[in-house]
Image (spheres, rainbow, N blue to C red):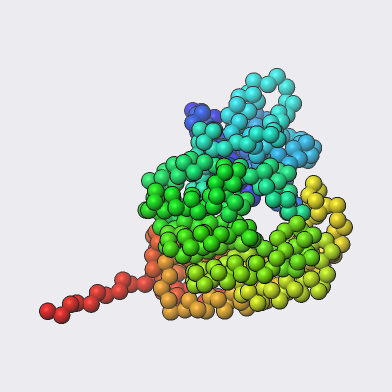
Amino acid sequence: MGKRFYLASLGCPKNTVDAQAMARLLQVAGYEGTDDPQAADVLIVNTCGFIAPARAESLDTLRELAAQRRPEQQLIAAGCWAQRDGERLLKLVPQLDAILGTRTWDAIVPLLRQLDERKSRTPLIHIERGRFALPETAGTAGYAIQGATAFLKIADGCQRQCAFCAIPAIKGTAVSRPIEAIVQDARALQEQGVLELILISQDSTTYGLDLGLKDGLVQLLERLVTEVPAIPWIRIMYAFPGSISPRLIELMAREPQILPYVDLPLQHAHPDVLRRMRRPANMDEVRRTIAELRAAIPDVAIRTAFIVGFPGETEAEFQTLFEFVQEMAFDRVGVFLYSHEEGTPAYALADDVPEAVKEERRERLMVAQQAISLRRNLRFIGKRLPVLLEGQGDDLTIGRTVYDAPEIDGLVLIQGQHPVGRIVPVQIDEALVYDLAGHIAQPKARRRRAV
């Protein structure tokens, strides 16, 4: 029997894609995956290093594995935190055998061979700053499958320089995958029966700029609609304010395969805060884009995210954000506390909003959004919605509508246990703050033609 590996992936879907790519490379090399750390020869944690809470989760996972490991087991920290601050990670978890960065995940097999051949317990560090590992150059695929849903990476890295964000320091500038490589992955997913394809990157709306493409996301979507007609749902994640083109809106309105769902992280609504954040500050343009989306796609669901407590945020600036959320009536809103991250441009500013004030502002905003969310959900009562069934428990079946992305948005609760991994019509009977409840709808009876 070959060696076994245990791989825990933390953080965002992009990390999950890298983790599954590593797993495929290991399996080709003869390793066997296991869900039991005690049964593994190699323990790998694909860490998240974006903000302090994510690093805390990664550290807890690493220390738990380190405390239980057998002497002959190898423990490796991979991913974003490893890339961002591998030396510090080694000090925090001295039992680590190796550090593997985000741009060198494709070197997992050679790294394990090096560990087998080393003469001492000195940790190996495999971090590079200049290169970028793409799935096709590593001889693997760039997707992760979860049930009937697949996350398909179309690019990585980011060319933006938002003041609060560590991603450019971790990932580097944006690198787009070639359209043909993405389409090849999508065809493979279609053959595997995937029902939902989620396109992910740091900023999907600027896909292809580095390849010299104009409106590259539109070009990619047009190919996918043609090449994978058997995948009924294609979802776009992470649009950037000001980058949603008229061609993209028109394509979404025309093609039912492209879901009426836009994730548009705005981060704030006061122009002065946005300028300090190094974000687009023209709120009239934001309002115009949202109005154009809603006019062209009347049932579009718009998700956004905001940061409260950014350095210098006054009560008046927060009030502008609060009133904007009420004005726009977004379908989904995430609110995050500002995290003062070393290595970001905002770290030079004073973290001068007390944590208690950040928490209070987040609570106020979320309470306001809950009323909006419930109001938006009430419009679905009595309607039939297509729902992707994903799980069962307590005599319930859990699913999602086209208006809900996995893990971040609402669910549909259906009485009884029904086969998962399919899309079915559900009659909505009840609306909750974030979720819906209903029952599987019976097919509509056909009217007989008069003779």
Query: Is 117 situated above or below 353?
Result: above
Q: Report which quarter residue 449 is drawn in.
A: bottom left
Query: Is 410 situated above or below 113?
Result: below
Quarter the C terminus occupies: bottom left
Kindly identify the residue that appears in the image at 73 percent across and 54 percent down: 162
Q: Position of residue 412 (x, y in %)?
A: 49, 68
In front here: 46 or 141? 141
Q: Position of residue 414 (x, y in %)?
A: 45, 69
In front here: 197 or 366? 197
Query: Is 51 situated above or below 29?
Result: below
Kindly identify the residue that appears in the image at 81 percent across and 66 percent down: 313
In front here: 282 or 383? 282
- On the question of residue 416 being in view, the answer is no
Q: Position of residue 79 (x, y in %)?
A: 66, 41
- On the question of residue 354 being in view, the answer is yes
Q: Is residue 181 left or right of residue 243?
A: left
Q: Is residue 256 left or right of residue 176?
A: left
Q: Report which quarter residue 82 is drawn in.
A: top right
Query: Is 101 situated above or below 348?
Result: above
Q: Position of residue 35 (x, y in %)?
A: 55, 43
Kindly identify the residue that appears in the image at 48 percent across and 76 percent down: 380
Kindly identify the residue that appears in the image at 49 percent across and 43 percent down: 179
Q: How many marks?
A: 0
Q: Residue furthest left?
A: 451
